[in-house]
Amino acid sequence: MASAHIAGVGMTEFGESPERTGRDLFAEAGGTAIEDAGIDRDAIDALYVGNFMGELSENQGHMGPLMAKAVGIDAPATRVESACASGGMAVRQAVTDVRNGEADVVLVGGVERMHNMGTAGATGGLSVAADDLWEIRQGITFPGAYALMAQRYFAVHGGDREDLAHVAVKNHANASNNPLAQYQTEISIEKVLDAPPVATPMGLFDSSPITDGAAATVLVSEDYAEEHGLETPVAITGTGQGTDNLSLAERDSMVQTPATEDAGQRAYEDAGIAKDDVDFLEVHDCFTIAEVLALEGLGFYEEGEGITAAREGETTADGELPVNLSGGLKAKGHPVGATGVAQITEMTKLFRGDHVNSDAVEDATVGLTHNAGGTVASAVVHVLEVAE
Amino acid sequence: MSDEITNDGYDQALEAIENGEPYALECPDGHQSMPPRRVCPECGSGNLEEVEIPTTGELLTYNVTHVPTPDFADDVPYVLGIAEFDDVRLTGRVQADAEEVDVGTPVEVGLGESETTERPLVVFELA
């Protein structure tokens, strides 16, 4: 099937900017992507915006038209919501439009404003990605939900907090020189283990931070790129999505993520690749345990064996399979609706050679992004390849 | 959020838990789920009937929540768990200290309330 070529990318600094509106964040990221692509705004045929909780954080729904004008375009514009997978799902819509000929040029971005809600407000806002009746009313939070998964994993497969701490240490190391990352500091195993608990066994440094930010990318058809002489060194060659029971308690297993498995399989088939072709990944590490479950769900580790990947150095920047070279959600930051798009923008730069960690994947030709919503009730996977 | 808003299916299921007669919905193939449901989430069957589930079950996992949503601001820290009762699993507040529970601990389901909002919630007492 045809590929959607990446013509340009843009991303704001991820971090703490409670005074900045969602529209301002989006305008910056979208404008940077358009400039990076070297296209006219008039050329854009469609806009997709990933956002999770604008209604709760800044009393703002209906972000399609708002963001279109924020970046100065007239194209048909739609917001896409799938909790923390909103950004990745928006990318999937954009890829589909380009592939089926509905559009030649699509701007797709994601945005989230979170710090203005405060910690309790953001915790409450994020919780609405769970089942209101049987989860939220019982006091579940997202750190709490992943804590339930981690505790179950320890009981079923073994492993401990120190294994998970290596995931946090790795991702902080990857972000340490990334100028757009929220945490540009390395941390130690001790610091992770001694951090205040959020929901045991998840501590503060097992958790991705509250983050304000936006990311955007311009996708074009191959024909459009050729006709207009655009440089598109990277293309999205496969996309896949999976869905599962919304509430964790309704799953057959709390240590498997079938939505990730389905999304991965569909993306591999769509791109015509096998998992062994993948050189590096950006996965949804909203909590340290989430990276482990993602690597197992995507088939890179057998169930129960992914927990030692970071500890053994297999997924570090100099390992066999680098994971989250951007710093991941953990250290780059997690403005939830922007995250799935930021995975694409960071991976594109890693391929192009203009990312601080590009040297780690100099010879890479295939990368994979994995973005999840809730306790992985939603998952979306994209395959990125160096365009021939 | 107004307390006057009711949730058919859920409210009755909580009442049954409070009365010590918890039930689930079951389809002809034996898949169990919690209401409100019009069809079985596993197979889509619309033929659902209420079946009793045991009041005691086994704790599958738990956490100690320290950072809550605003609705539980005065409740922290609390132990939250998922327990299995026959073929359904419920999320609820474990009425015990973390040191007293482990994966596999037997629990009895009941109804309690949030200390912050006084809204009802599922609780698990040590069985």
Image (cartoon, helix red, strand yellow):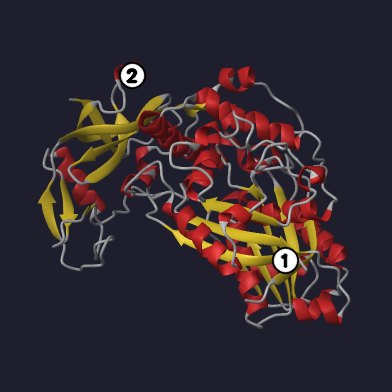
Relative to the observer, which residue lies in front, A136 or A229? A229
- Picture residue at 79% right of the left edge, 43% below the top: A180
Residue underneath mark 1: A235
| Kind of residue indicated by mark 1 | Ala
The quadrant in which the N terminus of chain A is found is: bottom right
Read off the chain for label 2.
Answer: B
- Picture residue at 11% right of the left edge, 42% below the top: B21
- Picture residue at 25% right of the left edge, 57% below the top: B36
x, y percentage for residue A47? 69, 71
Read off the chain for label 1.
Answer: A
- Tell whether label 1 touches label 2 (CB within 8 Å): no
Quadrant of residue A119 within the rendered picture: top right
Relative to the observer, which residue lies in front, A372 or A138? A372
How far apart are labels 2 and 1 at the CA level? Answer: 52 Å
Marks 2, 1: nearer the viewer: 1
x, y percentage for residue A177? 81, 36
| Total marks in image | 2
Left or right placement of residue A82 versus residue B40 in this view: right
Looking at the picture, does residue A26 appear above or below residue A320?
A: below
- Picture residue at 57% right of the left edge, 20% below the top: A193
Relative to the observer, which residue lies in front, A310 or B102? A310
* Residue A84 visible here: no
x, y percentage for residue A384? 68, 60
Q: Residues within 10 Å of mark 2 (few under 14, many from 20)?
A: few
Residue B97's disc is 2
Relative to the observer, which residue lies in front, A143 or A186? A186
Left or right placement of residue B106 versus residue A235 in this view: left
